[in-house]
Image: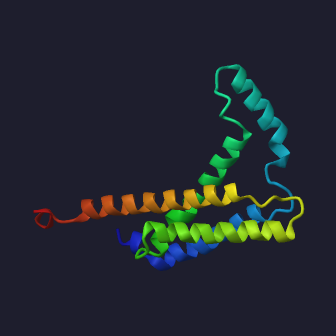
């Protein structure tokens, strides 16, 4: 439990996470460009074999954005344990907004998208809520029996 409360360690981890996130976000071309054809072929195959049409490229991209920001929210919640889930979500919104603004202003092959802001922020909120849930469960497990009565 003590390791979970080591804010300095979590803050270093959060800072370390920002580097690969920045590389993904500010790569000059879309990071999925090398696999777009393979992904399109895979989705076509899946659709022919019963996977619903809503499971599309747009859905996969949105899900990837959510999954990319879940660790951001999770680590942020442990880095700043006194912040509420919505404040962690606001941090995700700020980070995502900066990414999208940077793509809009500086990267002509990338596209700023309000949908990306929503999905990234959702991922940060999910990560923050997941961290809060885990922290509460571990706290309850570590309480002495006398404190439970």
Is residue 55 found left or right of 36 in the rendered image? left
Q: Residue furthest bottom?
A: 8
- Residue 52 in picture, x, y percent from top left: 64, 27
Q: Residue furthest right?
A: 108
* Residue at screen point 63% across, 67% down: 17
- Residue 51 in picture, x, y percent from top left: 64, 26
* Residue at screen point 70% across, 72% down: 98
Q: Residue furthest front?
A: 114
- Residue 26 in picture, x, y percent from top left: 79, 65
Tell me the quarter of the image containing the C terminus. bottom left
How many numbered marks does the figure carry? 0
Establish if 125 lies above or below 102. Answer: above
Of 104 and 132, nearer the camera is 104
Establish if 79 lies above or below 107. Answer: below
* Residue at screen point 11% across, 66% down: 146
Is residue 31 found left or right of 135 in the rendered image? right
Of 108 and 46, nearer the camera is 108
* Residue at screen point 81% across, 66% down: 104
Tell me the quarter of the image containing the N terminus. bottom left
Establish if 20 lies above or below 52. Answer: below
Is residue 32 found left or right of 77 in the rendered image? right
Where, by quadrant of the figure, is residue 71 drawn? bottom right
Where, by quadrant of the figure, is residue 143 drawn? bottom left
The way the protein has been coloured in the rendering is: rainbow
């Amino acid at each position: 439990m003590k390791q979970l409360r080591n804010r300095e360690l979590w803050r270093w981890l959060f800072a370390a996470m920002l580097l690969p996130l920045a590389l993904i976000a500010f790569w000059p071309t879309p990071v999925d460009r090398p696999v777009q054809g393979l992904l399109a072929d895979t989705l076509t195959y899946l659709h022919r074999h019963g996977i619903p049409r809503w499971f599309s490229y747009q859905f996969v991209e949105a899900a990837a954005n959510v999954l990319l920001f879940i660790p951001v929210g999770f680590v942020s919640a442990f880095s700043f344990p006194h912040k509420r889930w919505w404040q962690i979500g606001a941090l995700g919104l700020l980070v995502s907004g900066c990414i999208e603004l940077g793509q809009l202003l500086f990267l002509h092959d990338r596209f700023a998208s309000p949908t990306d802001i929503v999905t990234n922020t959702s991922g940060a909120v999910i990560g923050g809520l997941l961290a809060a849930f885990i922290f509460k469960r571990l706290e309850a497990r570590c309480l002495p029996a006398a404190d439970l009565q």
